[in-house]
């Protein structure tokens, strides 16, 4: 079993980005600027947004955090999106999900200028990704593909089973894995909560990407010898062993599954850190107007 070290890979990519930012600044160019909008005080979202903002500063970006209380109206949030769309200093921005129930997430996502949509959630970016055109790739799928690329993991002709069909991970990563090229060229099966015989399907997989959000869903008897397993789960499970009072738990029962794998990502320290650097990469691309003029 070999461990895919997302933490080390993310640190390496951060150094690459920081170097590029330094060159831009040395040449008199504009410092990339990311804004993050956070609604309410959900513990997970607070942590993710704080990490995103801190990481951006580490690589030399400017960052702005805009906060709203839980009772913000849809119209207020749309007005904020509009301001950010029109602010020439902001290269890209994200609205952290999930949003409170009274706000329609798709209205917010669609209101974001796709040229500043560094989350890659806007229908234009999702559509362009599906067509294999230049776009902002959503951060977690991009991070997964980058890990496979940097570890030279063979994907061509492999059977990739994706567990989960979310708009943020399952759908886009299944699209990327089937796309022509490296990594890609997989035969992809997408399983979800209504799939029959998940165990039998997983046993046929060369690569499993687990993104259901069900802690330790993938057990040892569901994985064939030599499989590659990518764990996208990050459920916060209460724990009395940590200072924060919870522990991040993946979708993979690591102790059972790892001995059977050729490669596996841990939680934490696997896909999570890669998600953040993918967002930074998108912000850099937005600042350089590398995808959209
Ligand atoms: N919530 C969970 N993951 C993400 C993400 O990648 N971007 C945003 N905006 N919200 C999220």
Image (cartoon, grey):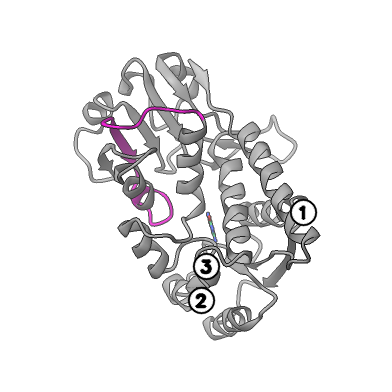
* Element on which disc 1 rests: helix
Residue topped by disc 2: 113
Which structural element holds mark 2? Answer: loop
Q: Residue at x 31, y 26 (%)?
A: 206
261 and 256: which is toward the camera: 261
Structural crowding at the residue carrying mark 3, measured as other residues with C-alpha within 10 Å and reported as few (<14), some (14–19) or many (≥20)? many
Residue 263 is a magenta residue: no
Image-based side of 160 in relation to 196, left or right: right
- Seen at 50% across and 64% down, the residue is 291
Q: Image check: 166 left or right of 283?
A: left
Q: Quadrant of residue 191?
A: top left
Per the rendering, the mark at residue 117 is 3
Pointers 2 and 3 in contact (C-beta within 8 Å): yes
Q: Which residues are magenta?
A: 151-171
Q: Circle 3 sits in a helix, a strand or a loop, which is it?
A: loop
Numbered disc in front, either 2 or 1: 1
């Amino acid at each position: 079993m070999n461990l895919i070290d997302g933490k080390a890979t993310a640190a390496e990519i951060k150094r690459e980005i920081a170097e590029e930012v330094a060159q831009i600044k040395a040449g008199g160019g504009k410092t990339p600027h990311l804004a993050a909008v956070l609604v309410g005080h959900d513990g997970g979202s607070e942590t993710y947004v704080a990490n995103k903002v801190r990481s951006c500063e580490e690589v030399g970006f400017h960052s702005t955090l805009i906060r709203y209380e839980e009772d913000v109206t849809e119209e207020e949030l749309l007005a904020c999106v509009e301001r950010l769309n029109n602010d020439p200093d902001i290269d890209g921005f994200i609205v952290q999900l999930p949003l409170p129930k009274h706000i329609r997430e798709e209205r917010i996502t669609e209101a974001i200028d796709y040229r500043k949509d560094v989350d890659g959630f806007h229908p234009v970016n999702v559509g362009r990704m599906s067509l294999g055109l230049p776009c902002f790739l959503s951060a977690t799928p991009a991070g997964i593909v980058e890990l496979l690329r940097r570890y030279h993991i063979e994907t061509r002709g492999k059977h990739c089973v994706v567990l989960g069909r979310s708009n943020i991970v399952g759908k886009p990563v299944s699209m990327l894995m089937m796309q022509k090229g490296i990594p890609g060229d997989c035969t992809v099966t997408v399983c979800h909560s209504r799939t029959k015989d998940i165990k039998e399907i997983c046993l046929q997989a060369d690569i499993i990407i687990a993104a259901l959000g069900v802690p330790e869903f993938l057990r040892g008897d569901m994985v064939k010898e030599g499989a590659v397993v990518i764990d996208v789960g990050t459920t916060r499970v209460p724990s009395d062993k940590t200072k924060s009072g919870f522990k991040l738990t993946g979708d993979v029962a690591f102790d059972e599954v790892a001995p059977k794998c050729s490669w596996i990502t841990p939680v934490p320290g696997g896909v999570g850190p890669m998600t953040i650097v993918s967002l930074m990469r998108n912000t850099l691309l937005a600042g350089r107007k590398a995808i959209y003029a």
